[in-house]
Image (cartoon, helix red, strand yellow):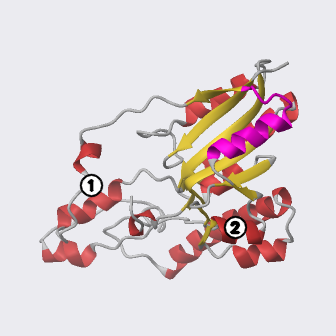
Amino acid sequence: MAKKIAQIEIEGVIENKNETYNQKWLLETIDDLKDDKKIAAVVLKINSPGGGVYQSAEVFDAVMRLREKSKKIVWAYFASLAASGGYYIGCSADKIVANQNTLTGSIGVIAGRFLDLTRLMEHHGVKEELIHAGRNKIMGHFSTPATEEQRAIMQKIADECYDDFVKLVSTRRNLDEEKVRTLADGRIYTARQALEAGLVDKIANFEDAMDELKKEIGNEKAQIQKFAPKKKHSIKSLLNGFSTNGNLMAATELLKSKTPYPAYFWDGGQFFGR
């Protein structure tokens, strides 16, 4: 009898790699668990605002392969935040359990970001000229205002990714697609709201959820084996962010975001206490 439950930590922005998240490690871990006979079930413990469409879909597909090839039970447990791409990945599970204080949902897409700094640059005497071929090659660059054509291009990308997200939720959560579209306006939901809407299956603390999972696999003494990537903290991460005093240097820091686009991402975490 398999005696263990694998607890996979999915934390932080879903991208290739950052201080708390590692896509390569996560995919390899999920793949390795397919052939681990000691593991009876897997729980995806998710605490994430989401991230790249590509990366989120990669993890979703990896979990689906795990379920199909190994027949292991897979649950998702939502910690404080399981939004957008975090929710997308959670939909790969057989069952979703949320903490009572979870924020989840945010079913929507950010296709890109147009940040026009031309007036700010003019004020500071900064001018940039980009040599390019193809009128839309440099769209989205901060020194070039967006055109209506460029907005339409990015909107089409957003709409396509959005449709994929909605259809996935409809299929995996057994919800009518039109109902999902009503829910999927990008907002976040509390755990109770998500339960009422059918976006999660149960509200419980982690310990109670694991006790229930142990009963489901028929081994109430099953051990939980935690899998988490090694975290590396930079000096910058210890400085509690950067100062947004309105000058050019602070504004250009916004351009360094590694969030991949298009993205299943919720960018509202700064409004809640941490």
Q: How far apart are marks 2 and 1 (CA)?
A: 31 Å
How many numbered discs? 2
Q: Which of 118 and 48 is in front in this view?
A: 48
Residue carrying label 2: 194
Q: What span is in magenta?
A: 206-222
| SS label for mark 2 | helix
Quadrant in the rendering for residue 30: top right
- The residue drawn where x is 39% and y is 59% is 132
Q: Quadrant of the C terminus?
A: bottom left
Q: Which of marks 2 and 1 is nearer the N terminus?
A: 2
Residue carrying label 1: 241
Residue type, numbered disc 2: Ala
Q: Which of 211 and 124 is in front in this view?
A: 211
Location of residue 111 with respect to 229 vertically, above or below: below
- The residue drawn where x is 76% and y is 19% is 36
Badge 2: how crowded within 10 Å, few (<14), some, or many (20+)? many
- The residue drawn where x is 25% and y is 65% is 251
Left or right: 89 as drawn, with respect to 46: right
- Work out whether residue 60 can be spotted: no
Residue type, numbered disc 1: Gly
